């Protein structure tokens, strides 16, 4: 469900009830959700990795929130 959309501007924001949201600005998509993977290592404030697709990346914040950015074609 898109709760915010502006005509003639490539922008949208979607929020669902399980603490995750999806933001699209132009051709860039940003997905934020809780991270459910068990990680057995020293906690860091931020961990960044390149994504599987070209131009995408992942950021783990406080070992709790996963932020994924990708390019939409």
Image (cartoon, grey):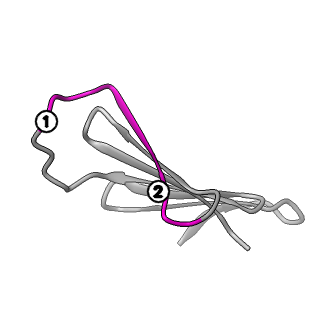
Residue 14 at x, y percent in the picture: 54, 62
Start-end of magenta stretch: 41-53
**Residue density around tag 2, few if under 14, some if 14–19, many if 20 or more, within 10 Å:** some
Rounded to the nearest whole Å, what is the CA distance between mark 2 and mark 1?
27 Å
Q: Viewed as shown, does residue 48 lie left or right of 73?
A: left
| Quadrant placement of the C terminus | bottom right
Q: Nearer the viewer, residue 15 or 67?
A: 67
Q: Relative to 47, does residue 56 appear above or below in the rendering?
A: below
Q: Residue 50 lies in magenta, yes or no?
A: yes
Residue 7 at x, y percent in the picture: 85, 65
Which residue is the extreme one toward the right?
8
Q: Viewed as shown, does residue 13 lie left or right of 59?
A: right
Q: Relative to 38, does residue 60 appear above or below in the rendering?
A: above
Give the residue drawn at x 34%, y 62%.
17
Give the residue drawn at x 80%, y 62%.
10
The residue under label 2 is 21
Q: Nearer the viewer, residue 19 or 71?
A: 71
Give the residue drawn at x 19%, y 55%.
37
Q: Secondary structure at mark 2?
A: strand
**Residue density around tag 1, few if under 14, some if 14–19, many if 20 or more, within 10 Å:** few
The numbered disc on residue 41 is 1
Q: Secondary structure at mark 1?
A: loop
- Asked where in the image residue 60 lies, by quadrant, the reply is top left
Residue 16 at x, y percent in the picture: 41, 64
Give the residue drawn at x 68%, y 69%.
72
């Amino acid at each position: 469900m898109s709760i915010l959309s502006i005509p003639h501007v490539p922008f949208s924001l979607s929020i669902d009830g399980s603490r995750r949201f999806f933001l699209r600005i132009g051709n860039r998509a940003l997905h934020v959700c809780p991270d459910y993977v068990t990680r057995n290592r020293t906690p860091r404030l931020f961990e960044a990795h390149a994504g599987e697709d070209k131009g995408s990346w992942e950021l783990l914040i406080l070992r709790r929130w996963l932020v994924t950015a990708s390019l939409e074609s």
